[in-house]
Image (spheres, rainbow, N blue to C red):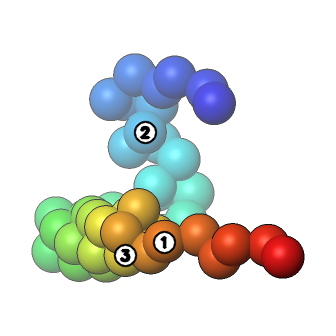
Amino acid sequence: MVALRSCEILDELKKLGIELPSDLIEYISEYSEYCSRRDSTPEKVKD
């Protein structure tokens, strides 16, 4: 994993077309929801 400073994160988000504060809030909200679902989903047990 790469550690980014806050200004680098904003630069990367701008490359994705996320510039307005409302777009940023929406992106963060959706990403947080994705992470919480991913982290709460138990891994399937392989037989």
Residue 35: quarter of image: bottom left
Instruction: Choose the circle earlier in sequence order: 3 or 2.
Output: 2
Q: Earlier in the sequence, mark 3 or mark 1?
A: 3
Q: Picture quarter containing residue 24?
A: bottom left
Horizontal placement of 28 versus 14: left or right? left
The N terminus - image quarter: top right
Residue beneath the point at 46% across and 56% down: 14
Provide the residue designation for mark 3.
37
Give the side of residue 36 with respect to residue 13, left or right: left
Pick the front one: 11 or 42: 42
Question: 10 Å neighbourhood of mark 3: few (<14), some, or many (≥20)?
Answer: few
Disc 1 target residue: 42
x, y percentage for residue 33? 29, 75
Helix, strand, or loop for circle 3?
helix
Please tell me whether mark 3 or mark 2 is closer to you in this view: 3
Query: As rendered, which of 33 and 37 lies closer to the eye?
Result: 37
Q: Where does the image place residue 42, in percent across and percent down from the top left?
A: 48, 71
Give the residue pinned by disc 2.
9
Q: Residue at x 36, y 29 (%)?
A: 7
Dot 2 falls on a residue whose secondary structure is: helix
Position of residue 12 in the picture relative to residue 36 (left or right): right
Residue 10, label in figure: none
Instruction: Give the amino acid type for the residue marked by disc 2 in the picture.
Output: Ile
Front label number (3 vs 1) = 1
- For marks 1 and 2 on the same chain, the one whose residue lies earlier in the sequence: 2
Closer-to-camera residue (14/2): 2
- At 65% from the left and 76% from the top, the residue drawn is 44
